[in-house]
Amino acid sequence: MNSILKQTLTLLRGTGFPHNPLSSVHQQLQQWRGIRVQVRNGNLEQALTVMQRRMRASGMEYLIKRQSRYHIKNSEKRILARKNLERKIRSEELSRKLYAIISKKVRGL
């Protein structure tokens, strides 16, 4: 747990605003947003488990592991490519459905 926390802190410490003045404000805000966890009643263990769960859900844990590794196996590349493609297709289908719903509402159908 401590090694993941240390790697997260070093990863977050390295992120800063990009020096390119043409970069969008949205990218700058996403870099500083990060993961925030509230410590309730001084219960640090519970806060750490919540943080670890959120990191896993957001994909930050994978980014930390990927940063420390130098080589990705071809089988892992194929799996990641398939997952990214499925995610992209699902997102496009959802946007098409939402566009159809909104256009029907605008037209009054």
Image (cartoon, rainbow, N blue to C red):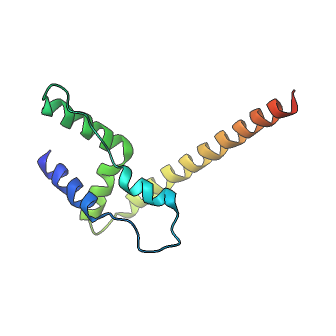
Is residue 51 placed above or below 34 in the rendered structure?
above
- Residue sitting farthest toward the bottom: 20
The picture places residue 20, in percent across and down from the top left corner, at: 46, 74
Q: Is residue 94 left or right of residue 16?
A: right
The picture places residue 26, in percent across and down from the top left corner, at: 50, 56
Which quadrant of the view contains residue 105?
top right
**Quadrant into which the C terminus falls:** top right
The picture places residue 48, in percent across and down from the top left corner, at: 19, 37
Q: Residue at x 20, y 33 (%)?
A: 47
**Quadrant into which the N terminus falls:** top left
Q: Is residue 23 left or right of residue 1?
A: right
Comparing 91 with 27, the one in front is: 27
Comparing 56 with 29, the one in front is: 29
Is residue 10 placed above or below 99 in the rendered structure?
below
Q: Is residue 1 left or right of residue 32?
A: left
Comparing 18 with 75, the one in front is: 18
The picture places residue 89, in percent across and down from the top left corner, at: 61, 47
Count of numbered circles in the view: 0
Q: Residue at x 13, y 28 (%)?
A: 43
Which quadrant of the view contains residue 78?
bottom left
Which quadrant of the view contains residue 80?
bottom left
Q: Residue at x 44, y 60 (%)?
A: 28
Is residue 104 placed above or below 71 in the rendered structure?
above
